[in-house]
Image: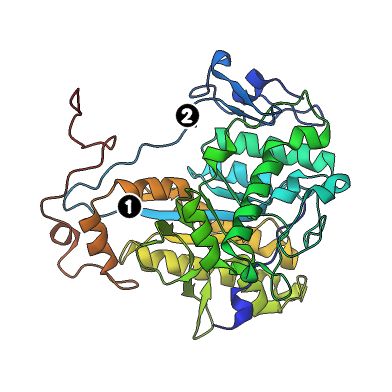
Amino acid sequence: MAATQRRIAAGAVVAATVAASLAGCATGTDGSKEEAQVPLKGAAPKSAVRLIGDGSTAYTGAQPHLPRPERLKPGRKPPQFVVFSWDGAGEDSQRLFSHFRKVSKANHATMTYFLSGVYMLPQEKAELYKPPQHSPGRSDIGFNDEQGIAETVRQLRLAWLEGNEIGTHFNGHFCGKNGGVGEWSVEEWKDEIAQAKQFVKTWKTNTGRSKAAPLPFDYDKELIGARTPCLEGQKNFVRAASELGFRYDTSGVNDQVWPRKREGLWDLSMQLVPFPGHTYEQLTMDYNFMVNQSGTTTQGDPGKYEYWGNQMRDGLLRGFHRAYDGNRAPLIIGNHFESWNGGTYMKAVEEVVEEVCNKSDVRCVSFRQLADWLDAQDPKVLGRLRSLEVGEAPRQGWASFLAGRPAPAPKGVPGAPASRSGQ
C-alpha cells in the first residue's frame, strides 16, 4: 500500500449541575437542552459523585449501559462485532459529534471517540502544551476556544453516559519528519500521554468555567486505548502504553482476521477491505478513501461526491459481509468529524451504521467493549478463531469448529465458577 494510503489526517478543530448532567439533562452553553435525554437509570446518585482535582472530572460510579461480557458457549457462532471510531473527536460548528451520538443511539450502537487533548485547551493557554521535540505552544491542528471546549465537554459527557468510550488521539498531531510522532521515544510518548490526560483533567481551570458540570469519569481509569496520528510511531507508543496499563492499540493496518495481543495490548487496528472498482484493497477510514479518490484535495469534483461516498459505503459493506459470512472477525472502522468532498463520507458511514447495526447477531461496540469480550474468552477458542483466514468460514460449520471442553472462564465472567470464601 502506498504511504499516503496509511496517513491519517487531523480531525476538525473544534452550566449545568452535576446531578442534572448525570440524569442527561445537561444544559448547553446556549441554554438549550439536549433533545435526546439520557435515562437516569444507571447513573450514580448525587451522593456517589466525587469530584477529582479542580472538578473537571468526577467519579460517578460504573459507566451506564456497559454490557457485561459473556464467554462463548461451546459450538456457538461468534457475534459479528463492528467498531466505529472517530479521530480527534470534538464538537464544532458542523455538529457532527452530536449528530453521530444520535445516529448511534437510534441504531443500537456505541462508539469510541478519540479526543485530541488540545481541543480541551484554549488558544490563549497554548504554551501549557510542551510537545516532544517541538517548542511550547506548537500544534499542527491548533487549539480551541472556550465555547468550543464547552460544547465538546457537553458531547463527551453525554456520550459517556450513553455507554460510549472516550479514548485519545493525543495532542499536536505531528506527522512525518522533523519531530513527527514516528521519531518519538518511549519516554516522549509517556510525556505526550500525560499531557493529553492533564488537559482533560484541568479544562475548568484553563477556561475559567469553575461552575460547569464535570466530565462524569476518572480519565486516568477511562483512558485505555488510542490511535496514533497518521498511524505513525506505533512501535514506541505500544511500549509506552503497555507500561502505562493501556489495554489496546488501533494504530496499525491489519487484514480482516481475529485480533491478537502485542506487548500485552490487543491489536485492534483498522483493516483492509475491498475497494469497489479497483484491484487493491482499501483501509477502513474516510481519509484513505478520499486520498484515493480526490488526492489530498478535500473538496474535489462535486459531480463525483455521490459516487465516492457510495464507493466507501459499498467497500465497508463488502468487508462487513466478508466477515459476517466468513470468519466473523471484528470489523474496525475509523473516521473524522469532517465534511470532506461535501460530507459524502459522513453519509456513507451513517448508511453503514443503519445497514449493519440493527441485525440481531451484530454488535456495534466501542473498543473497550470489544477488549472486554476478548478478555472473557477461552484463549484456545480465540486461537482457533485466529486460524481462519480472511473471509474463511469453518468448513465443518461453527458447531463443530468451536465444540469441545472450554477452559475455565475468568472470574467475574458469566459461566465462571462461584468464588469461595477464604480463597
- Name the quadrant of the N terminus: bottom right
The kind of secondary structure element at disc 1 is: loop
Question: In the rendered view, would you say 124 is above or below 209?
Answer: below
Q: Position of residue 198 (x, y in %)?
A: 68, 42
Q: Nearer the viewer, residue 173 or 340?
A: 173
* Mark 1 or mark 2, whichever is nearer to me: 2
Q: Which residue is the site of mark 2?
A: 62
Q: CA distance from mark 1 to mark 2?
A: 25 Å
**Residue farthest left in this picture:** 405
Q: Position of residue 229 (x, y in %)?
A: 64, 64
Q: Are marks 1 and 2 in contact (CB under 8 Å)?
A: no
Question: In the rendered view, would you say 230 is above or below 404?
Answer: below
Question: Mark number for residue 225?
Answer: none
* Circle nearer the N terminus (1, 2): 2
- Does 129 sit left or right of 384 as displayed? right
Q: Quadrant of residue 213?
A: top right
**Residue farthest top in this picture:** 47
**Residue farthest bottom in this picture:** 279
Note whether residue 98 is visible: no
Q: Please name the residue shown 17% across and 57% down the image.
A: 402
Q: Please name the residue shown 78% across and 71% down the image.
A: 299
Give the class, few, some or many, for how many residues have Cα within 10 Å of label 1's Cα (few <14, many ≥20).
some
Q: Please name the residue shown 70% across and 55% down the image.
A: 171
- Name the quadrant of the C terminus: top left
Q: Which residue is the site of mark 1?
A: 79
